[in-house]
């Protein structure tokens, strides 16, 4: 063999840095191409293929089920092949030919659990399709392009990057924009269903069978309190939120919808439940909410907070916790995720005892904090 004197050498360190830099530069691409197949309902199409096809379909079979007479097979092929490298689809070649369309596609366990819709034909209680589409919707992506302006403008913009992008804070904008309101509410509902399925499976504080009045503060359309009441029928549930939210809430057996403002007062209850609400607000406003929670409780009442408790040291969930913390910069003017000491400080200032903190099984980036009223402020 002729030797031209060329030898393969390790790339210089500068080039070795290209791999992590490439991942950062192109990081939005996977989610947006996944969004395209979710909007085309391709995971649903494959999920309903049936056992006779081993729950796989060929590219042409998938294309035939799309709502068009002439889909671009070349585009579809390239998208599905890429997403097969990202853990969404399982790709298998049907023949040994060089035909680029000669492939079948199935769903990975991740896709089956989270990216198949919950619908009439797909009973999937863990579907995160609406939440995924909300996070990647233009309305909720646009604020990310204004983060640098938040840094420069300081604390003067009450609604954060969302207000810079849309002229109003998140709550005012979704109140006035019906489409964005639906996208936001259905997205949060799907996320809530997953969290609450895990919560009711692990939280034992309602199992004594005693009659309790439980209020869910900022409960949206009532998805969270509905699951609590369904699991524990002896509980009288109250879904508490702003009037513009409650007006569109559907009737739920065992649940009373009550409108109001948590900064003014909260309906009295034996237990106050508050999930992913306090991270939307700065410390002063959190204390105000928590003080109203305290006023709503009897002396032996309980407060249950479901939220993230940031790791102080490197941990497996640190990256996702930090991402949620950055989302708070994007969506709110003062919201943040908090570590254990910050939570203890907030609760102490609001008249609550040091919380018992446990990790939510299955989603270790989310925690349950349980506390009671301190004997005196």
Image (cartoon, helix red, strand yellow):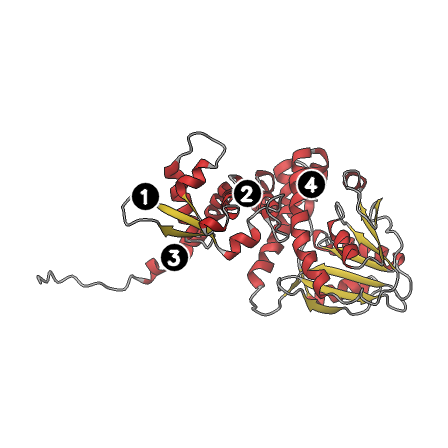
Closer-to-camera residue (184/224): 224
Query: Earlier along the polypeptide chain: callout 2 or callout 1?
Result: 1
Q: Which mark is residue 52?
A: none
Please tell me how crowded label 3 is: few (under 14), some (14-19), or many (20+) other residues with Cα within 10 Å: few
Q: Which mark is residue 19?
A: 3
Tell me what residue is drawn at x 86 percent, y 48 percent: 264
Query: Earlier along the polypeptide chain: callout 3 or callout 1?
Result: 3
The answer to whether the residue labelled 1 contacts the one labelled 4, judged by CB atoms less than 8 Å apart, is: no
Query: Earlier along the polypeptide chain: callout 3 or callout 2?
Result: 3
* Rendered position, 306 above or below 66: below
The residue indicated by pointer 2 is 145
Q: Secondary structure at mark 3?
A: helix
The Cα–Cα distance between marks 4 and 3, rounded to whole angstroms, is 37 Å
Percent from the top left, x then y, of residue 135?
59, 46
Percent from the top left, x then y, of residue 178?
69, 34
The Cα–Cα distance between marks 3 and 1, rounded to whole angstroms, is 28 Å
The residue indicated by pointer 4 is 169
Tell me what residue is drawn at x 42 percent, y 51 percent: 84
The Cα–Cα distance between marks 1 and 4, rounded to whole angstroms, is 48 Å
The Cα–Cα distance between marks 4 and 2, rounded to whole angstroms, is 15 Å
The answer to whether the residue labelled 4 contacts the one labelled 3, judged by CB atoms less than 8 Å apart, is: no
């Amino acid at each position: 063999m002729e030797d031209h004197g060329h030898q393969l050498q390790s790339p210089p360190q500068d080039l070795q840095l290209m791999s992590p830099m490439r991942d950062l530069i192109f990081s939005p691409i996977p989610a947006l191409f996944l969004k395209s197949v979710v909007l085309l309902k391709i995971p649903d199409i494959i999920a309903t293929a049936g056992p006779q096809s081993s729950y796989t379909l060929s590219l042409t079979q998938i294309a035939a089920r799309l709502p068009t007479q002439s889909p671009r097979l070349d585009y579809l092929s390239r998208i599905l092949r890429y997403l097969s490298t990202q853990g969404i689809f399982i790709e298998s070649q049907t023949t040994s030919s060089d035909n680029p369309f000669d492939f079948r596609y199935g769903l990975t366990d991740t896709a089956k659990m989270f990216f198949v819709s919950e619908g009439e034909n797909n009973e999937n209680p863990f579907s995160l399709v609406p939440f995924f589409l909300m996070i990647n919707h233009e309305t909720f992506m646009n604020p990310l392009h204004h983060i640098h302006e938040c840094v420069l403008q300081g604390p003067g913009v009450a609604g954060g990057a969302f207000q810079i992008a849309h002229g109003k804070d998140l709550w005012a904008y979704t109140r006035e924009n019906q489409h964005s309101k639906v996208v936001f509410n259905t997205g949060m509902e799907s996320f809530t269903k997953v969290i609450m399925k895990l919560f009711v499976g692990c939280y034992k504080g309602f199992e004594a069978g005693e009659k309790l009045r439980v209020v869910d503060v900022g409960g949206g359309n009532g998805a969270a309190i509905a699951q609590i009441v369904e699991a524990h029928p002896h509980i009288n549930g109250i879904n508490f939120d702003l009037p513009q939210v409650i007006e569109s809430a559907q009737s739920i057996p065992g649940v009373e919808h009550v409108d109001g403002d948590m900064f003014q007062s909260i309906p009295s209850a034996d237990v106050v439940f508050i999930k992913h609400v306090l991270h939307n607000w700065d410390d002063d406003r959190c204390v105000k909410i928590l003080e109203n929670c305290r006023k709503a409780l009897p002396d032996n009442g309980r407060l249950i907070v479901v939220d993230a408790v940031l790791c102080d040291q490197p941990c497996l969930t640190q990256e996702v916790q930090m991402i949620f913390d950055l989302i708070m910069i994007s969506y709110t003017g003062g919201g943040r995720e908090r570590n254990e000491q910050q939570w203890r400080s907030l609760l102490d200032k609001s008249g609550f005892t040091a919380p018992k903190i446990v990790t939510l099984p299955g989603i270790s980036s989310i925690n349950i904090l349980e506390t009671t009223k301190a004997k005196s402020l």
